[in-house]
Image: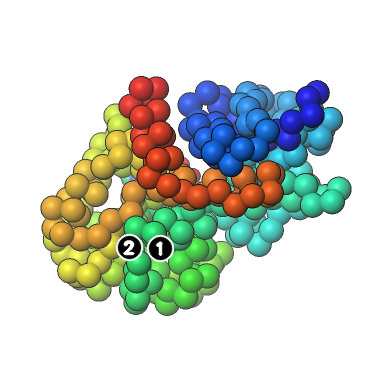
């Protein structure tokens, strides 16, 4: 065990994460003598790993697939982690291991930075109904968006979101996406469509209002076919890389005690890593 404050990313597999690039950059630029390591932990070992985090030398952790849901039972989750059904950030509060889901603020903070005023939208249209969609919906409702339409390939999953998040959430059929666009001031893709080696997301963004904002959670490629189509229409966009950077801010500040900044320099560094290490 070293004297450095250290955090880690717990996943299985965990090798592809960009989190070490982000946190090591902040440690370096803020002059903090800390470390951020990757810990590949299989499902059968994750309970033991997390309950002995301090003994392993860690002040906190990020958690990724497939362990995020399990963290609700191993930690004291906040309202966000409970509503999303998954936690991605763990920290010690005195002797208590707490957890949250920073995808919520990652999504919202990136929208605020990329498209200020986006929240004047009366209605948002969210594509997908998985864990990422839950984080997005929680953030939109918390911010006061009054109507959130959800379209999902499997309708039952969108229906479940109404039960969990209430009557401001309205399921719409997957083949009705283009029809509801004219009244939607914000379009968000939370599905894997458009990701490298996945089919593109085929929707007609020309039907959105001129003032609409289009957000994509996919960050490989950086400019997805959806974002390219939105940019071609002159619409404002928020990309998945921005969300990835903003979701890392709170974990860092909780572990290392300083508030880091999302800068063009950090973005360029992670972009370069995305190109060189696919
Ligand atoms: P995450 O936690 O990233 O949200 P997830 O829970 O696996 O991951 O959800 C993936 C989302 O992408 C789901 O909304 C999924 O739709 P289904 O619920 O119908 O599976 C959506 N998705 C994945 N592949 C898709 C495809 N080819 N067409 C439409 N939607 C797709």
> Residue drawn 20% across and 66% down?
208
Dots 1, 2 in contact, CB < 8 A: yes
> Could you tell me if residue 261 is visible in this image?
yes
> Residue drawn 40% across and 69% down?
148
What percent of the width, then of the height, locates residue 107? 45, 55
Label 1 CA crowd tier, 10 Å (few <14, some 14–19, many 20+):
few
Q: Is mark 2 within 8 Å of ligand 1?
A: no
- Residue lying furthest right: 95
Give ligand 1's quarter of the image: top left
What percent of the width, then of the height, locates residue 100? 64, 52
> Residue drawn 28% across and 62% down?
213
The chosen color scheme is rainbow
**Left or right of 90, for residue 129:** left
- Under circle 2, the secondary element is loop
Q: Where 169 sits versus 73, above or below?
A: below
- Under circle 1, the secondary element is helix
> Residue drawn 47% across and 75% down?
144
What percent of the width, then of the height, locates residue 138? 52, 63
**Left or right of 158, for residue 138:** right
Tell me, for residue 115, which label it has, or none.
2
Q: Is mark 1 within 8 Å of ligand 1?
A: no
Name the residue that disc number 1 marks: 112
Label 2 CA crowd tier, 10 Å (few <14, some 14–19, many 20+):
some
Task: Tell me the CA gap for discs 1 and 2.
Answer: 6 Å
> Could you tell me if residue 90 is visible in this image?
no
């Amino acid at each position: 065990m070293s004297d450095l404050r250290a955090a880690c990313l717990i996943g299985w597999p965990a090798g592809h994460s960009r989190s070490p690039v982000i946190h090591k950059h902040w440690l370096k630029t803020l002059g903090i003598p800390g470390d951020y390591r990757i810990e590949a932990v299989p499902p059968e070992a994750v309970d033991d790993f997390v309950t002995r985090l301090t003994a392993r030398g860690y002040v906190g952790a990020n958690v990724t697939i497939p362990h995020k849901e399990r963290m609700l039972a191993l930690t004291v989750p906040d309202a966000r982690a409970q509503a999303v059904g998954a936690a991605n950030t763990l920290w010690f509060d005195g002797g208590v291991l707490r957890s949250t889901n920073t995808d919520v603020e990652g999504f919202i903070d990136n929208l605020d930075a990329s498209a200020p005023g986006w929240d004047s939208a009366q209605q948002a249209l969210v594509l997908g109904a998985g864990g990422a969609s839950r984080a997005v919906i929680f953030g939109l409702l918390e911010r006061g968006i009054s109507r959130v339409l959800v379209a999902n390939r499997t309708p039952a999953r969108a229906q479940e979101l109404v039960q969990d998040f209430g009557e401001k959430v309205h399921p719409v059929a997957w083949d009705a996406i283009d029809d509801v666009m004219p009244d939607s001031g914000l379009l968000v893709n939370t599905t894997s469509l458009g990701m490298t080696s996945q089919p593109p997301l085929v929707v007609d963004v020309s039907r959105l209002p001129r003032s609409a904002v289009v957000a994509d959670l996919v960050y490989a490629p950086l400019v997805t076919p959806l974002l390219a189509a939105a940019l071609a229409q002159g619409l404002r966009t928020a990309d998945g890389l921005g969300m990835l950077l903003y979701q890392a801010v709170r974990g860092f500040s909780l572990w290392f005690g300083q508030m880091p900044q999302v800068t063009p320099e950090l973005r360029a560094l992670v972009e370069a890593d995305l190109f060189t290490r696919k």
